[in-house]
Amino acid sequence: MRATSLAVLLLLSYIFAIVAARAVEEDTAVGAPAALAPGQAPPLPKPHPLAEPRPSNQVGFPKVLSQYVISPTTLRPARVALGQKLFFEPRLSGDGTVACATCHDPARAFTDGRPASVGIQGRVGQRNAPTVLNALYNKTQFWDGRVNTLEQQAVLPITNPFEMGAASVSDAVARIAGDKDYQSQFMQAFGRAVNEQDMPSAIAQYEQTLASFDSPFDHFIAGDANVISDQAKRGWELFNAKARCHLCHALADNQRDATLFMDNDFHNIGIGIIRHNVVALAQKAERELARGHLAAIDTAAITSDLSVLGRFLVTREQKDIASFKTPGLRNVLVTGPYFHDGSMQTLWDAMDHYNKGDGLNDPWLDKDMQPLALTEPEIDDVVAFLASLTSAQYKVIGDQEYARQLALSKVSRPQRDTARAFGPKRKQPEPPPF
Ligand code: HEC
Ligand code: HEC
């Protein structure tokens, strides 16, 4: 009798241990996302504690800038709550399987962990999902900046055939219009019935609450000298000098910028360019893609090989061929894989890319790219600095991800080319005739 109850107890505690371990795993996630059956959209993330609006009293929160980008007259709790619900709403997609959160999962710092996002019916797009955290501060949205505001952004994935695949925005809205909860929430938030103007506006308001600061680096800047390692401190110095990162990941070249680590600008830094014949693609875009047609650009960027043309799709200027928006670097440790095409696995790979000043045979390479001659310890320093930009909510997965990337970097450094990193800047080819 005693033995039996002990066995039951053991069994129970075993089950609880499994359940507890599962709960932690599900809470936040790093590493490779779930494999998908052919033709199947990724699983829909559940509403999650990390999806909640972030407080404005976080250490490092840029008060003045935030007042400038968020309009306090329109930001209302009822609209934010509605937007948060819509962000998880699969009925906005063509077959009811995909929501914004599918690709912007709060447990993964609002990304999906995949090189390129997967949408409705398992369709694989061309681009890596950026985080939505701090997107409120972006002057333009998307890797190529094809729209300026979060409201304009929010409608495009809904109708993109590889993302949410709705026939039209009004079609998507019609599918939630009969829902009693939405009816009362729209009424409460906007004082009118469910409609297609207020829907993206609610989503945008929710996104305006996703400011993510409060990283060890923010505490360091606020005066807590010992909260980051000496390695990370050296990395911050390198970032602003020898490693030349500040030339693009800062608002000004001549002044340290500890806020967003971007310049609201576009650069060709040589990602993916070697694998594509961009001149032929640019000519194809000129022939086939209507100029300034936003929906056509959106479809091309996500579903076709023209995607690699980047900013050129928007401006049609030769200098913008294969140039992409400088992403902010906050939470970068937990938003891999990296770059617009998700082509790099670790921050060490990203460093190796910059160290060799990549872009061989790339006539449009940004003039600020050049070999850096960073030593291995210096590369580790910059990575430690980048890791210190992880917000407190993602500390646990950040630590796991750092260990994972470090281990991977010990066995795999596909981008490393020490001879080029320590060699002279190579002569850049002239742009070919167009
Ligand atoms: C199938 C995956 C997928 C879905 C669903 C999706 N997104 Fe995205 N999102 C992406 C990808 C990929 C990009 C980058 C595309 C590009 O730059 O061309 C992106 C870009 C963005 C950006 C721009 C961020 C930046 O830094 O430029 C925002 C904001 C955003 N998405 C919000 C949303 C919202 C809101 C929804 C729902 C209405 C949504 N996304 C649905 C994959 C997705
Ligand atoms: C000439 C401008 C420029 C310089 C210099 C530069 N970057 Fe970047 N960075 C960019 C652009 C543009 C992208 C996106 C490019 C793409 O995806 O095609 C990017 C992307 C990244 C990414 C990937 C982020 C993500 O979310 O996928 C990391 C990490 C990064 N940079 C770190 C650094 C570091 C560290 C340095 C210094 C060693 C540096 N950058 C120097 C412009 C620059």
Image: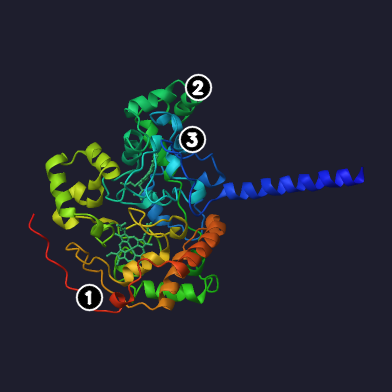
- Which of marks 1 and 3 precedes in the sequence? 3
Look at the numbered disc 2 and give the secondary structure of its residue.
helix
Estimate the spatial distance between the alpha carbons at disc 3 and disc 1, rounded to whole Å: 51 Å
In the picture, the disc for residue 85 is 3
Label 2 Cα crowd, 10 Å radius (few <14 / some 14-19 / many 20+) = few
Tell me whether circle 3 and circle 1 mark residues in contact (CB < 8 Å).
no
Label 2 is placed on what type of residue? Lys
- In the displayed image of the protein, which residue is found farthest to the right? 1
Label 1 is placed on what type of residue? Lys
Look at the numbered disc 3 and give the secondary structure of its residue.
helix
- Which of marks 1 and 2 precedes in the sequence? 2
Estimate the spatial distance between the alpha carbons at disc 2 and disc 1, rounded to whole Å: 64 Å
Q: At x 15% / y 41%, what residue is drawn?
A: 291
Tell me whether circle 2 and circle 1 mark residues in contact (CB < 8 Å).
no
Foreground disc of the pair 3, 1: 1
- Which of marks 3 and 2 precedes in the sequence? 3
Q: At x 91% / y 45%, what residue is drawn?
A: 2
In the picture, the disc for residue 425 is 1
Residue marked by disc 2: 180
Residue 228 on image: x %, y %: 52, 71
Q: At x 35% / y 32%, what residue is drawn?
A: 165
Estimate the spatial distance between the alpha carbons at disc 2 and disc 3, rounded to whole Å: 14 Å
Foreground disc of the pair 2, 1: 1
Indicate yes or no: mark 1 CB to ligand 2 under 8 Å.
no
Residue 196 seen in this snapshot: yes
Label 1 Cα crowd, 10 Å radius (few <14 / some 14-19 / many 20+) = some
Look at the numbered disc 1 and give the secondary structure of its residue.
loop
Q: Is residue 270 above or below residue 25?
A: below
Could you tell whether 180 is left or right of 150 in the image?
right
Tell me whether circle 2 and circle 3 mark residues in contact (CB < 8 Å).
no
Residue 99 on image: x %, y %: 43, 36
Residue 193 seen in this snapshot: no
